[in-house]
Image: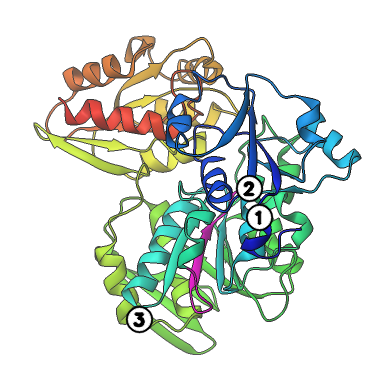
Amino acid sequence: MIKKIQDIKDKRITIMGLGLNQGGLGVAKFLAKNGAKILITDLKTKVELAPTLEKLKDFDIKYILGRHREEDFINTDMIIQNPAVPHNSKYLKIARTHRIPIETDLGLFLQLCPSKKIIAIAGTKGKSTVSNLTYHIFKQAQKEVALAGNIGISVLDILEKITLQTWIVLEISTWQMEGIKKRKFRPQTAVLTNILPDHLDRYQNFSKYTQSEKLIFKYQQSNNNLVLNFGSQETRQAKIETSAKTYWFSVKEKVVPGCYLERDELVFQLEKCKIPFAKITDLPLPGLHNLENVLAASTIGFIHNIPAEVIRKAIKSFPGAPYRLELIREFNGIKFYNDTCATTPEATLAALKSFPQQPIILILGGKDKRLNYEKLGEFIGENKKIKQIILLQHPDYDASLKIFSAIKKHLDSEKIIQTSNLKVGVEIALQQAQPNDIVLLSPAAASFGMFENEFDRGNQFNKIVKNL
């Protein structure tokens, strides 16, 4: 058991899964800097992992790539499991049989972190924007605060900066929560943005996925806070499943205690105390889903006694979260938005609904997660503002086939252009677009196959758009 950083020195540690999405990079660097004897094993090859391996070239690390070996899960003091590695992996079963401790980077962080002032944000969609805005609000209030988690920033990268007084804003995925289940994780404040169908390629069914999202509050007690979306059936149900003090946010209903929309004002109400704190016109982000995100983050601010005026200033100055309906460029009167993190049909629907008045050329498609695209197809067919569909094609892109099938029931096939090259897709969109149009990358599917991950997809889109 590692109880303090000094315990890491000379420990034999196998890291299972290095990955290309920061998954194993942060923990590898942290352990190497603190004197562990590290072996990294990954099913990907040296060529596939080249970008990550380059960042570790200065460390003394042994690699077994393109395969796993049973002995690496037996002749070791500890296994670090990458969040993307399934818990039922046969190699993890071997480690358990030999009583080798299995840990995750987040579990290690929670063991070593001096601060217990953790705000943890979970949910299918919206958690990155809520996390970033919460961090921005706390910064505006001049609080000592750190941001990390499932957001491209390893928790172990920020560990040395954390004191007893530091607030930690933690974006957390279901995979990460499953990895720390034995710790009975109990954040001071938990947020559940929504629960929508996702990751059904990993979970047996939606019910199993829902159970994993609800781990965010499972071990909370009466002195903890839980912020829930009143507009989501699954999160509304959580009220009767928790011991924590519950707060709400809603764009449609008056909710107490919590934040809601009243005409054109954002309001926080606690019992009879009602505080208007911003107007719709103060919001810099488009879309009803982003209004929900603002209400969620504002609720967190009020729970922790941040003044209304500070919250309003933070909302007005918030630049948004990268890759989430991010305006990349306006070129010849055409706006290019990057929404690469929209990896479900519901997320793409929310993006499309954010621009009710403007013509849209939509770029979408990717790898399937066993999701249903019928409602998205129906909406696209009924929405006269959608001028053109650019559908990305690749041998691995089974979601693109489902999307095409769903859309063509409601839309002429000539309005759907298929391409196996994102650059070509953007160029076609530019040819079709006119001033005041929007070119929107909102894929509704995973990226793997054509891209390393969703962020690679987003970065390539940004580069193409900036070079037009």
Quarter occupied by residue 43: top right
Identify the residue shown where x is 72% and y is 24%. 68
Residue 8, numbered label: 1
- Element type at mark 2: loop
Going by the numbered disc 3, the residue's amino acid type is: Ala
Q: Is residue 23 visible?
A: no
Q: Which mark is residue 36?
A: 2
Question: Does residue 298 appear left or right of residue 362 in this picture?
Answer: right
Disc 1 is placed on an element classified as helix
Does 332 appear above or below 400? Answer: below
* Residue 165 belongs to magenta span: yes
Residue found farthest to the left: 332
The percent coordinates of residue 383 (x first, y second) are: 36, 31
**Range of magenta residues:** 162-173
Q: Nearer the viewer, mark 3 or mark 2?
A: 2
Q: Residue at x 85, y 34 (%)?
A: 94
The answer to whether the residue labelled 3 contacts the one labelled 1, judged by CB atoms less than 8 Å apart, is no
Which one is nearer the viewer's eye here, 396 or 89? Answer: 89
Q: Rounded to the nearest whole Å, what is the CA distance between mark 3 and mark 1?
A: 44 Å
Mark 1 vs mark 2, CA separation in Å: 6 Å
Residue 309, given in percent of the width and then of the height, sits at: 30, 81
Q: Residue at x 85, y 35 (%)?
A: 93
Mark 1 vs 2, N-terminal side? 1
In the picture of the structure, the residue carrying the numbered disc 3 is 308
On screen, residue 297 versus residue 279, left or right, reads right
Residue at 30 percent of width and 73 percent of height: 312
Report the amino acid beneath label 2: Ala
Marks 3 and 2, how far apart in space?
Answer: 47 Å
Return the residue nearer the eye: 123 or 79.
79
Closer to the N terminus: mark 3 or mark 2? 2
